[in-house]
Amino acid sequence: MTNSRGRRRRVNGRTLERAMGCQDELFLDFIRRCFEWEPDMRLTPLQAIRHDWIRRKKPSAAAPVDSTQPSRQMSQQPSVASHGQG
């Protein structure tokens, strides 16, 4: 990151990568561009929502299927609307 005099700055003497503990280049680029000192060089809100880091597909976090357990279907679950009526 640069300061108002154009000098390269480090967060507590560390690079942004080390300070954040991150190696994701798209994320680091997004953060650098959001924190750009010069307003004309900084991301606009429209540019920010169009940044590759925001737009990329996240990996699926679906749990692995356990074939030893019987599958539960939605039809087996009682509906909320049917409780207390009747």
Image (tube, grey):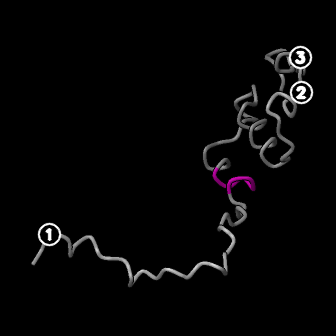
Is 61 placed left or right of 32 in the picture?
left
Q: Which residue is mark 2?
A: 15
Kindly state the secondary structure of the residue where label 3 is placed.
loop
Quadrant the N terminus occupies:
top right
Q: Marks 2/3: CA distance?
A: 7 Å
Kindly state the secondary structure of the residue where label 1 is placed.
loop
Q: Marks 1/3: CA distance?
A: 63 Å
Callout 1 touching callout 3 (CB < 8 Å): no
What is the span of residues highlighted in magenta in the rendered image? 49-54
Which is closer to the viewer, label 1 or label 3?
1
At 49% from the left edge and 80% from the top edge, which residue is drawn? 72
Magenta span main SS: helix
Looking at the image, the residue that sits furthest to the left is 86
Considering depth in this image, is 59 or 83 the residue closer to the camera? 83
Q: Which residue is mark 1?
A: 84
- Establish if 69 lies above or below 20: below
- Establish if 20 lies above or below 7: below
Q: Earlier in the sequence, mark 1 or mark 3?
A: 3
Which class describes the residues within 10 Å of circle 3: few (<14), some (14-19), or many (20+)? few
Marking on residue 13: 3
How far across and how far down the image is residue 83, in percent? 20, 71
